[in-house]
Amino acid sequence: MKSKLHIAVVGAGAFGGWTALHLLERGARVTLLDAWGPSNSRASSGGETRIMRGTYGPDQPYTELAARALGLWRKYERRWKRQFLHRTGVLWMVSSRDDAYERGSLDVLRQARIEFEELSTPEMKKRWPQINCDDVYWGIFEPECGYLDARASCQAVVDAFIAGGGAYRQLAVSPDGLEDVPLRNLILSDGSRFKADHYVFACGPWLGKLFPETLGRLIRATKQDIFFFGPPAGDSRFADAQLPVWGDHGGRFFYGIPGSDRRGFKVADDTRGPAFDPTSGERVVSPATLKRVREYVGSRFPAMKDAPLIETRVCQYEQTPDSNFVVDRHPRMENVWLLGGGSGHGFKHGPALGEMMAELILKDGEADGVWRLSRFSK
């Protein structure tokens, strides 16, 4: 009797966890490894919430991938009888005269069948009077989208993986020997060695450290500061029942998630921060970034002008030079796959990307050129 293909997935975040689950559901034998556990505080998938949106500009694969992910989030919510996607809608505010990104998004949204509305400034003011839209030219509203429970959904994926017969081990993988050809085994933090038929490395900001020759110059971890402000007592205008998730595309790109689970009003500046060590970096926010974000909040949401800062968080993006994912085989090893480069927008795509990854491995496929490593050598 032919034995099952054994696949090791390293990293239990949004990319690795979903890949492991999809591989298991397709009949593979899968071992999932993670150094600190799914959605731990060092991980790019850590924290409470992430945005689910389809607006991505023209000529890109992510709107279609988001549409597939929306369907899979629904599927697994039904299966597990849990809600992870909170469909508050997403409002994309155009506060720059250069709106090519947004105009270019409309046909792509239509093609992907993601529901949306074009809104004028008066329409936005009427719907959400708590937002100062005086310098907003128009907007896109995606009613099917909203925000995801990040930490909870990562844990749910791993729980389902284990319940389905997958093996999970909370151990780190040493970089020693990973770029030796062929890769004979993994050296684990308990001193043991681990061998599989195929290996998937979905290690977020650690990919460059594990594969310095291949990815060291291509994946850069950047420090990203997140802020939570406290609305006035008894004021529900900034909770998710009355305000959508929002993005504000002007001179800078600010985004936010309305108050949920009593955590406060989440706001961040999407500008890429300085280099950051995800293992040993001190997770303390920058006073300069806080000042900039506070000034923005006071302008865009006047009732929040003097709102107290009630919580902060430092996460990181694992940024590629072009902000596109890496989905490819190791250039010198057919049975080693590299999956990462989320670049601050990857979480929402986890179910669809994991599905794609499982199909590529089990059917010996090739990833789309936009995600292959060869794009960096052109």
Image: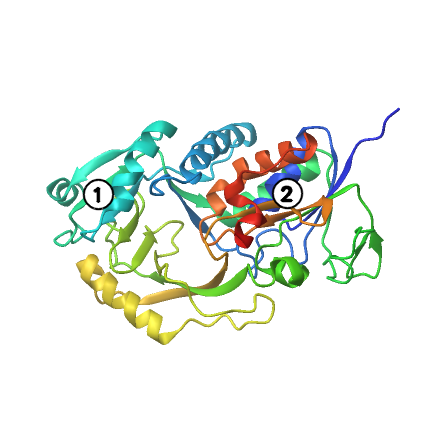
Outermost residue to the front: 378
Q: Is residue 324 left or right of residue 1?
A: left
Whether the residues at callouts 1 and 2 have beta carbons within 8 Å, the answer is no
The disc, 1 or 2, on the residue closer to the chain's N-terminal end is 1
Label 1 sits on residue: 139
Q: Nearer the viewer, residue 246 or 107?
A: 107
Q: Give above or below for 91 relative to 290.
A: above
Identify the amino acid type marked 2. Answer: Val
- Whether residue 127 sits left or right of residue 265 in the image: it is left
Residue 121 falls in image quadrant: top left
Rendered location of residue 84, percent (x, y): 47, 39
**Residue projecting furthest to the top:** 1
Q: Secondary structure at mark 1?
A: strand
Between disc 1 and disc 2, the foreground one is: 1
Task: Note whether 235 is above or below 27 in the view shown.
Answer: below
Residue at image location 27% in from the left, 53% down from the top: 249
Packing grade of label 1 (10 A; few <14, some 14-19, many >=20) is many
Circle 2 residue: 158
Q: Is residue 197 left or right of residue 74?
A: right
Q: Residues within 10 Å of mark 2 (few under 14, many from 20)?
A: many
Q: Residue furthest bottom?
A: 287
